[in-house]
Image (cartoon, grey):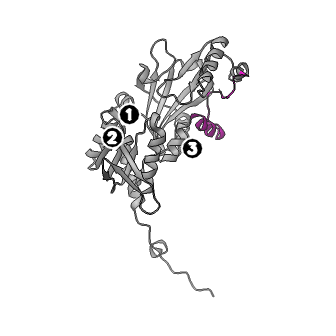
Amino acid sequence: MKIVLLARNPTLYSHRRLVEAAEQRGHTIQVINTLLVYMNITSHRPEIRYKGESLSGFDAVIPRIGASITFYGLAVLNQFEMIGVYPLNNAESIARSRDKLRCLQLLAGSGIGLPVTSFAHSTQFTDDLIAMVGGTPVVIKLLEGTQGIGVVLAETPRSAKSMIEAFRGIHANILVQEYIREANARDIRCLVIGDRVVAAIQRQGRAGDFRSNLHRGGCASAVRITPEERAVAVRSAKLMGLAVAGVDLLRTNHGPVVLEINSSPGLEGLETATGIDVAGKIIEFLEKKVKERTRPLPSHRQRRNHTPAPAS
């Protein structure tokens, strides 16, 4: 296969591992800076250009689009899809998962367990908003936040109200969620590929921090997940339309709840903690999907190997 990897920083662990895994399996892979791509959008001859040259002949595209460039990154990915390149995750599914509010609504509508969550535009009824999730402490999240940035814990009604009003004062959209004490600053990251969880880790926040993100100084260890957790992770990824996803779960007294779904999950913590070649499994999955896509359909004769008897 000839693969394009959309990524701004080729030196990141996840990107290096995907390149290594692709090359080890005999594929050609080119890393291109998403923001340096430009496009000719036309009905008859859509084109993608990069550094003065046309990009063509690719079989598959692996999008590693940072949250800060989602709009442009998805435009580029859409263009690759327009010219017939197979996407590991398509633009529509990434957009769906990146919209945290829409993501939660889709999951809730399908019966997936979630932390109790409230959302509002006005601060006029903030007390009621906090009460809806069971009162303080509450977790307040910026809709646009990533890697634990823009996630704060408010432990009293006064601090919760002040934080909500401050965020709304700068016109930021936020979610207010229940604080799940029994999770104890731990969550589970499940790496879903297709219809399987191929690796799972438990992430523990550093001392004094309720967030478990590895980027915030947390640590990771391999974990055995339950059949229910496995089913919830796979179903959540499918609801988003994602072929590859990191699904973050909390273990609660009433079963697993989904915190977030990541369309470009980091591989370092997963591979280091579990010893599993996650990058290799992603490339293997991509091989299978591209082969299925290019396999010719059976002919009419192959589909029907007998001639119906004439009517009597």
Q: Amino acid at mark 1?
A: Leu
Work out whether mark 1 precedes mark 2 in sequence or the reverse, and give the earlier one: 2
Residue closest to the eye, 61 or 23:
61
- The magenta-colored residue range is 100-125
Residue 152, position as x, y percentages in the image: 55, 19
> Magenta span has 290?
no
Q: For mark 2, does the 10 Å Cα neighbourhood hold few (<14), some (14 to 19), or many (20 or more) residues?
A: many
* Above or below 43: residue 283: above
* Res 179 visible: no
Residue 239 tag number: 3
The residue drawn where x is 54% and y is 34% is 229
Using the image as rendered, state which of residue 66 and residue 279 is in the foreground. Answer: 66
Mark seen at residue 267: 1
- Which comes sooner in the sequence, label 1 or label 3? 3
Q: Is residue 312 left or right of residue 78?
A: right
Side of 135 relative to 75 (left or right): right
Q: Residue at x 41, y 66 (%)?
A: 296
Residue 78, position in %: x, y? 46, 50
Q: Amino acid at mark 3?
A: Leu
Amino acid type for the residue under numbered disc 2: Leu
In this view of the protein, which residue sits in the foreground, 166 or 211?
A: 166
Q: CA distance from mark 1 to mark 3?
A: 22 Å
Outermost residue toward the bottom?
312
Q: Which mark is residue 18?
A: 2
Give how far across and how far down residue 230 sits, in percent: 51, 36
Q: How far apart in space, not on screen, are marks 3 and 2 (Cα)?
A: 25 Å
**Residue 277 located left or right of residue 102:** left
Q: Residues at badges 1 and 2 in contact (C-beta under 8 Å)?
A: yes
The residue at 44%/69% (across/down) is 298
Bin the neighbour count of mark 1 within 10 Å (Cα to Cα): few under 14, some 14-19, many 20 and up.
many
* Residue 174 visible, this angle: yes
